[in-house]
Image: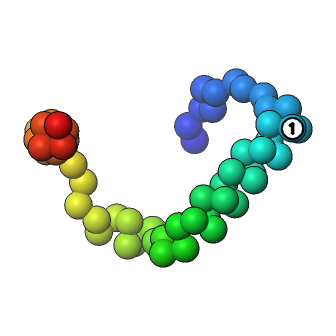
């Protein structure tokens, strides 16, 4: 099992604000869908060369 390497804490206020922000994102982007593990696994992945190409194309 992987080791948790993040040691951070959020105040109750910050956690509440983050949850509200996520709720707003879901409201503004209703077209987003959830993918199953198998669906995510079938998606193409970008390698280092592909990622460099895409970055260059977006410039």
Question: Which quadrant of the rendered structure holds the C terminus?
Answer: top left
Q: How is the image coloured?
A: rainbow
Residue nearer the viewer, 7 or 21: 21
Residue 38 visible? The answer is yes
Which residue: 70% across, 24% down?
A: 7
Q: Where is 45 relative to 13, above or below?
A: below
Give residue 45's position: percent from left, percent from top: 24, 54
Residue nearer the viewer, 17 or 47: 17
Give residue 1's position: percent from left, percent from top: 57, 41
Give residue 43's position: percent from left, percent from top: 28, 65
Q: Which class describes the residues within 10 Å of circle 1: few (<14), some (14-19), or many (20+)?
A: few
21 vs 5, left or right, is right
Please count the marks in the image: 1
The quadrant in which residue 26 appears is bottom right
Please name the residue that numbered disc 1 is placed on.
Answer: 13
Q: Secondary structure at mark 1?
A: helix
The quadrant in which residue 14 appears is top right
Give residue 25's position: percent from left, percent from top: 60, 59
Residue 33 visible? The answer is no
Q: Where is 20 relative to 59, above or below?
A: below
The quadrant in which residue 53 appears is top left
Which residue: 72% across, 26% down?
A: 8
Residue nearer the viewer, 45 or 58: 58
7 vs 36, left or right, is right
Which residue: 85% across, 32% down?
A: 11
55 vs 20, left or right, is left
Residue furthest toward the right?
12
């Amino acid at each position: 099992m992987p080791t948790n390497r993040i040691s951070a804490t959020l105040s109750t206020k910050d956690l509440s604000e983050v949850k509200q922000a996520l709720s707003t994102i879901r409201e503004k982007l209703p077209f987003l869908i959830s993918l199953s593990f198998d669906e995510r696994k079938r998606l193409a992945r970008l390698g280092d060369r592909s990622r460099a190409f895409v970055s260059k194309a977006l410039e």
